[in-house]
């Protein structure tokens, strides 16, 4: 097998560690620009919903990336409606009601196929029935398709648009750890905003801001339930300007196909973590939430806050979403977290990408 055959998902998972290490060094030599600094290479096991992958986690220019094997026949998209999901969750039945009734947990293909008359008004869905919910799901997910996905190095955590990670600021000690030279010119201004002079009355109601943006200078984002801010440099940019900037560094953005494969590993499930959508305040709910928020089967961490979009290489193919005020049902609330969710949000050519609205994820594709 040649290099590209060996880094195919079907072959990669059967290779020994020593063979994977040899292949990785070849990939780094031929596909990662010499201007990119490579550090801390480690073989790591990832698993989600029974899909296991032993691959590499490494630092490129000080940022965490994972190596994702390719797949020449990846099946992406969705046309199965609510099949596999829990009907009682989707329809909002309470525990008392459940005790008196029995529900099917899946919707069959036959039921879906017999509902051709559902396609009526574009925005009219009966979200009180499984049929209507299935129609809504199919209309808001990408088309079923078979595509060729190259192997790729993909950034583990997405970054706020227009930013580069600099380090962490501790609000208790007032100290910064990270790229000191880039942080120092803005330290005084940041400290003035985070530690303002307040009267006794003002101090009673004051709290640290969730975010802090000074365009073309810096961007700070508070880590919930902590005393820390992530600190970024900031450069106001359009989608095209972001792509050009990444290209100069040796990176790019994932296409919609590549994003869907990287997030869902080609699994034929609507949600990468399984079929559970109702997250309750109990041990089971916490277990589901940990699967949602943790690394996926390839080691990527996907934002689940539903307050920002994630960019792809196509400004008309945006993933994830910002919560709308009109989301009244469970499926409307949770579907944006689906691997195959398609948003109607479009980025205009001249539009600047705000870091509180958009995320982006760097990638290096392994293509011949």
Image (cartoon, rainbow, N blue to C red):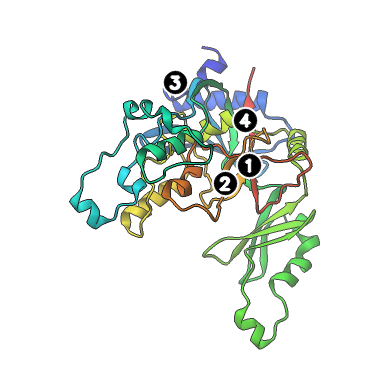
Residue drawn 57% across the image and 67% down it: 227
| Image x and y of residue 58, in percent | 58, 38
User: Which residue corresponds to mark 4?
Assistant: 255
Would residue 48 be visible to someone looking at this image? no
Q: Which disc is residue 321 wearing?
A: 2
Q: Are marks 4 and 3 in contact (CB under 8 Å)?
A: no
The earlier-in-sequence mark between 2 and 1 is 2
Q: Nearer the viewer, residue 3 or 186?
A: 186
Q: Residues within 10 Å of mark 2 (few under 14, many from 20)?
A: many
User: Which residue corresponds to mark 1?
Assistant: 345
Frontmost of labels 1 and 4 is 1
User: Which residue corresponds to mark 3?
Assistant: 10
Above or below, 174 relative to 111:
below
Q: Are marks 2 and 1 in contact (CB under 8 Å)?
A: yes
Q: CA distance from mark 4 to mark 3?
A: 22 Å
Q: CA distance from mark 2 to mark 1?
A: 8 Å
| Image x and y of residue 268, in percent | 41, 29
Above or below, 150 relative to 88:
above
The earlier-in-sequence mark between 4 and 2 is 4
Q: CA distance from mark 1 to mark 3?
A: 35 Å
Frontmost of labels 4 and 3 is 4
| Image x and y of residue 228, in percent | 60, 63
């Amino acid at each position: 097998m040649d290099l590209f055959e060996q880094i195919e998902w079907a072959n990669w998972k059967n290779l020994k560690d020593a063979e994977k290490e040899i292949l990785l060094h070849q990939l780094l030599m031929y596909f990662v620009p010499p201007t990119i600094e490579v550090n801390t290479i480690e073989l790591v096991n990832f698993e989600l919903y029974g899909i296991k992958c032993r691959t590499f986690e490494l630092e490129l220019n000080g940022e965490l990336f994972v190596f994702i094997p390719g797949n020449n026949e990846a099946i992406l998209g969705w046309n199965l409606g609510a099949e596999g999901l829990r009907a009682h969750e989707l329809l909002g039945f309470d525990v008392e009601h459940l005790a008196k009734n029995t529900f099917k947990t899946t919707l069959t293909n036959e039921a879906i196929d017999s509902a051709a008359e559902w396609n009526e008004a574009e925005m009219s869905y009966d979200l009180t029935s499984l049929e209507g919910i299935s129609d809504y799901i199919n209309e808001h997910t990408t088309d079923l398709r078979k595509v060729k996905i190259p192997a790729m190095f993909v950034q583990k955590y997405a970054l706020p648009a227009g930013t580069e990670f600099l380090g962490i600021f501790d609000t208790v000690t007032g100290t910064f750890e990270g790229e000191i030279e880039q942080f120092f010119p803005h330290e005084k201004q940041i400290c003035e905003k985070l530690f303002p002079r307040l009267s006794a009355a003002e101090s009673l109601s004051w709290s640290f801001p969730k975010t802090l943006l000074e365009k073309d200078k810096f961007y700070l984002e508070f880590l919930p339930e902590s005393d820390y801010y992530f600190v970024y440099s900031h450069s106001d940019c359009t989608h095209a300007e972001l792509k050009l900037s990444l290209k100069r560094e040796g990176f790019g953005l994932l296409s919609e196909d590549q994003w869907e494969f990287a997030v869902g590993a080609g699994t034929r499930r609507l949600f990468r973590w399984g079929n559970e959508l109702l997250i309750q305040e109990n041990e089971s709910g916490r277990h589901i939430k940990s699967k949602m928020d943790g690394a996926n089967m390839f080691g990527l961490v996907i934002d689940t806050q539903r307050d920002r979009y994630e960019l792809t290489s196509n400004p008309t193919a945006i993933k994830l979403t910002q919560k709308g005020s009109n989301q009244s049902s469970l499926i409307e609330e949770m579907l944006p977290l689906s691997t195959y969710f398609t948003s109607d949000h479009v980025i205009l050519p001249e539009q600047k990408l705000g870091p509180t609205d958009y995320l982006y994820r760097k990638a290096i594709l392994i293509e011949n």
